[in-house]
Image (cartoon, rainbow, N blue to C red):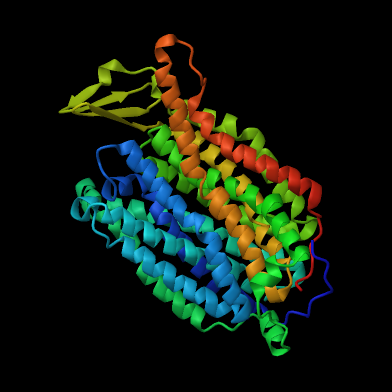
Amino acid sequence: MVNASASPAVTTNKKTLWKVIGASSLGTLIEWYDFYIFGSLAIVISTKFFPPDNPTAAFLSTLATFAAGFVVRPFGALFFGRLGDIIGRKYTFMVTLLLMGLATCAIGLVPGYETIGFAAPIIVLVLRLLQGLALGGEYGGAATYVAEHSEPHKRGFRTSWIQTTATFGLFISLAVIMLTKSSMSAEAFDDWGWRVPFLISSVMVVVSYFIRRNMDESPLFKKAKNEGKTSTNPLRESFGKKYNFKFVLLALFGATMGQGVIWYTGQFYALSFLQSVCKVDFDQTNFIIGCALLAGTGFFVFFGWLSDKIGRKPIMLAGMLLAVLTYRPIYDRMYQLTDVEAKQELMEQRRTVGQTLVKVYDDGSTATVVSQGDAVTQTVKVGQRAFFFLALLVFIQVLYVTMVYGPIAAFLVEMFPVHIRYTSMSLPYHIGNGIFGGLLPAVATYLVTKAQAANMVQQASGALPYDKPYLEGLWYPIIIASVSFIIGLLYIKNKNQDVQ
């Protein structure tokens, strides 16, 4: 890491410090809520903004649009990071908050494909890109702002509250969707109710904006600005100087790349896997993920606190290694728990209503089969025992997430000097999370779909190329996390530094 002299003392009192953490965390939480509403409603959105003749292609297109928001996050990091290092942390992430809120609200107002045709997915894609740019600037500003108010020996603990916001944002997005869905008929939700979670964002953004508006600038940035030590060209100093650029690359390939794929596997891909591969009921899937997230979120703070005691490196690398070694067994077990073909059906309880067939199994699971012409869809509701174990398996993945993500903000802040910190830490974070992590749902789903298609082609011959095609998507996070683990193990030093 960058060697530095001791930083000036942080004089922020505890009451003000917790206000800083609260205001920063609330705004960041809302931005994550905005960002993940789209992902949480991916299956519904695929039927609204894309051609309905090929559901699989529509779903993959939705995931690709979702991923596009991640791909542009590094550009947001560069643009807003530069502003943050020149103008200040506070005002920059206030702009990102408003940009995110407006884009999210607009998605809830876009007419569907049946109304405006191909203009619908194009408009949604543009709005997703604006969301990605906004999030690219938000996280670095919030993490830097909190870190520069914090005591050096408690920086991991203080910044870990920012780390909880991504999980809470996903959790709240699921909760709002479930409450909205339960308050109206299924037909109304499918028709217009799915827009409500997007529109609710506007209220939350306004509240957060007024809270943030009354906060002061970071004391370390103010000191640097008063002394004339801020950067006039943060991009050149961050990436044009070989010494600093080396640490940017180390932060990316030795930490955030692996952290990014573990974050999205343990939280978002778990949701997508249960819904699209295992065909588990939409509401039940959200409830499973919600329970796991609620149980695991406190561990972000625990591992942030622990990183102040023993260092960031061992905790983050342990999370990566555990994920690499256990992902395939975990997801295989998730599939087996939801596979009704392997369960015993209670034939006497089978019932048919119109074109809907309901099957009941000995473990309490049910499968609802709907026939519409040549199309046959099946939705599974698992029994209580399977529900508990699915929530436990997702919780284990969330635990890995908290290990790699809890200390990451303090780790990144400590790698770079004050005058270029916002820019330098934001880029590797958002490449690791936005590109390597954000592409995970689309890449993993594509790998699973490809493997299943290959098996169908070879089914007649009896020699299937993939024994468990539903696990093929996991090779992406496993390989990326393995590379990051090796680089981090060899080149990252386990030493927490003072803020510079």
In this view, 338 is above or below 142:
above
Give the side of residue 1 with respect to residue 24, left or right: right
> Residue placed farthest to the top in the image?
461
Q: Residue at x 44, y 58 (%)?
A: 35
Indicate the quadrant where residue 123 lies: bottom left
Q: Which corner quadrant holds the N terminus?
A: bottom right
Q: Would residue 443 be visible to someone looking at this image? A: yes
Q: What percent of the width, then of the height, locates residue 406? A: 64, 56
The answer to which image quadrant residue 482 occupies is top right
In the orientation shown, which residue stands out farthest toward the left?
354
Q: Quick check: 47 above or below 365?
A: below
Q: Residue furthest bottom?
A: 226
From the viewer's side, name the closer residue of 39 and 326: 39
List x then y, in percent, for residue 481: 65, 43
The quadrant of the image that shows the C terminus is: bottom right
- Horizontal and vertical percent position of residue 322: 67, 39
Residue at 59% across / 45% down in the picture? 262
